[in-house]
Image (tube, rainbow, N blue to C red):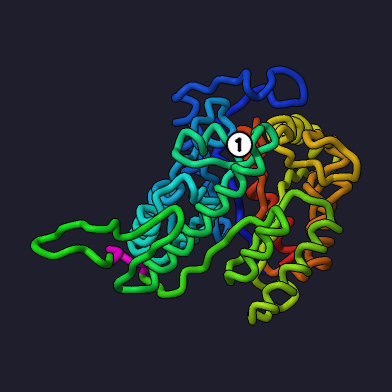
Amino acid sequence: MRFDVHFYGTTPMGDPGAGAPEPADRRIGNDGVIEGYRNLEHWAGLCDRLGFDTMWLTEHHFQYEGYETTPNLILMGTYLAARTERLRFGQMFNVVPQWHPLRLAEDFAAADILTGGRMVFGVGRGTVPREAQNLGSVVASGDNDMAKDADRINREIFEEAMAIIQLAWSQERFSYAGKHFTFPVAGIPDRGRTVTELSLVPRPATSDVRIYQPVGSPATLEYVARQGFFGVFAMAPYPVIEQSWTRFAEVAAEAGRVLGPGEGRALQIPVHVGRTSGAALSSGKGPHDEFVKFLAPYGRFNRVAKGVPFDYRPTVEESRASGMMAIGSVGEVVEILGRWRELLSLEHLVLFPDLPGLSRAAMDDQLQLLAEEVIPQLA
């Protein structure tokens, strides 16, 4: 079983919890962002020594609140790879509609070569209009009045961009004509000739780049499974994930890709572990509640139970009981993760300990407890 670790790139935050301030009222200065980056560098070294397979980071922009502050995951991963020995670095996820597809393809290819194959390619469609609409794209969101139309356009752009990236990586010469992109642009002169095709320089060192994408809707599930990508599942109760997990394998099989019970998929789950249940709740409740407070407006927790509102904020007890998060003593966290392992025949687990408000020392303790006491009981 493969064990990874995932960080949002949260900056230091001394007052996490369910009460004030509201997320939009937080204002993290650049010094806080720099300190957060130094923490990520420190934790990359620790994760490398502790034996985690891959450290995943998350792309976001303009987040003055300080929750997610790594806008370029390929750049950050390349930097961290140069300061570690064997840890791989993944993008969870590159928000493809906010990138020029050929620049994204080039940057990943260069990083793949420079790091000796230690980069892992993850892609997503995005979730935050503040980012998408200021970077030349659109995205659906719970607070976006044109969510349906924005989602359609976003999906079109994403799928064309992914076709271009894969074509550019796999073909020495390529061209593409679609609704949103045409490469090369028609009529470009070049030294007495007209450009009719392009060659990506460089291309990845490997001819088969594994692609990861989050599965958050039936339409995305169909796309990811049929494309041969690896599906990443997260933030839903046991029965919801199990149903989607099974359906993913069925769709993949329809497309000619037969998966074993746990193949081709990964589960990401927030975790917070303590020596005792009381210690875990004492140190984890505030970070849990802050995490919920900042993500709930995007509808991230409305699957915890039937009939709850779009922006529902679960309690720490609800998060634990549903399986959406593993919070508790070593034994309790092992029990929750073990239930997921048995339910899904898990082969790939991504642990997310980066709840807002944890100090560097507290995160060190989390990583050590996970690597030295939790994982050995699951491996």
Mark 1, residue position: 361
Decide whether residue 200 is among the magenta residues. yes
Q: Position of residue 87 (x, y in %)?
A: 49, 59
Query: In the displayed structure, does residue 94 sit left or right of residue 148?
Result: left
Q: Main secondary structure of the magenta part?
A: loop
Q: Quadrant of the C terminus?
A: bottom right
Q: Position of residue 88 (x, y in %)?
A: 49, 60
Question: In terms of depth relative to the viewer, which is nearer, 270 or 241?
Answer: 241
Q: Quadrant of the N terminus?
A: bottom right
Indicate the quadrant where residue 261 lies: bottom right
Q: Is residue 62 above or below residue 6?
A: above
Q: Is residue 178 above or below residue 259?
A: above
* Residue at 86%, 58% in the rendered image: 239
Indicate the quadrant where residue 167 lies: bottom left
* Residue at 77%, 25% in the rendered image: 18
Q: Which residues are magenta?
A: 199-204
Question: In terms of depth relative to the viewer, which is nearer, 295 or 282?
Answer: 295
